């Protein structure tokens, strides 16, 4: 698991989820997003590459 998706409660009209990266076994609680116009998110610490499909799968499953 390198990507976690946590959804917000649905009682808020701005409800959406948040993506977090699991780097070297620890959850980095800094929200990440795929950079605008980019096709890959690369972690500078562990070197993992996350593609748009990884974000989609994490949204479906909760984590990848």
Image: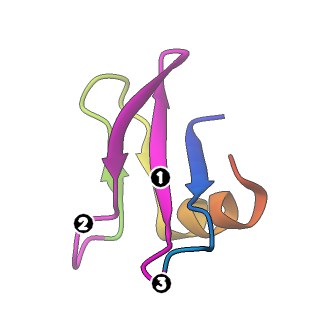
Callouts 3 and 2 close, C-beta under 8 Å: no
Of 8 and 56, nearer the camera is: 8
> Is residue 64 in sight in this rendering?
no
Quadrant where the N terminus is found in the figure: top right
Q: Residue furthest top?
A: 25
Q: CA distance from mark 3 to mark 2?
A: 24 Å
Query: 51 above or below 48?
Result: below
Q: Which residues are magenta?
A: 13-38
Q: CA distance from mark 1 to mark 3?
A: 19 Å
Q: Earlier in the sequence, mark 1 or mark 3?
A: 3
Numbered circle sitting on residue 19: 1
Q: CA distance from mark 1 to mark 2?
A: 13 Å
Kindly state the secondary structure of the residue where label 1 is placed.
Answer: strand
The reply to whether the C-beta atoms of the residues labelled 1 and 2 are less than 8 Å apart is no
Is 44 rendered above or below residue 16? above
Q: Position of residue 38 (x, y in %)?
A: 26, 71
* Callout 3: SS: loop
Q: Which mark is residue 13?
A: 3
Q: Position of residue 27 (x, y in %)?
A: 48, 25
């Amino acid at each position: 698991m390198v990507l976690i998706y946590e959804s917000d409660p649905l009682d808020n009209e701005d409800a959406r989820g948040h993506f977090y990266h699991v780097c070297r076994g620890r959850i980095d609680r800094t929200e990440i997003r795929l950079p605008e116009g980019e096709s890959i998110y690369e972690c500078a610490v562990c070197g993992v590459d996350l593609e748009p499909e990884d974000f989609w799968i994490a949204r479906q499953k909760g984590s990848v």
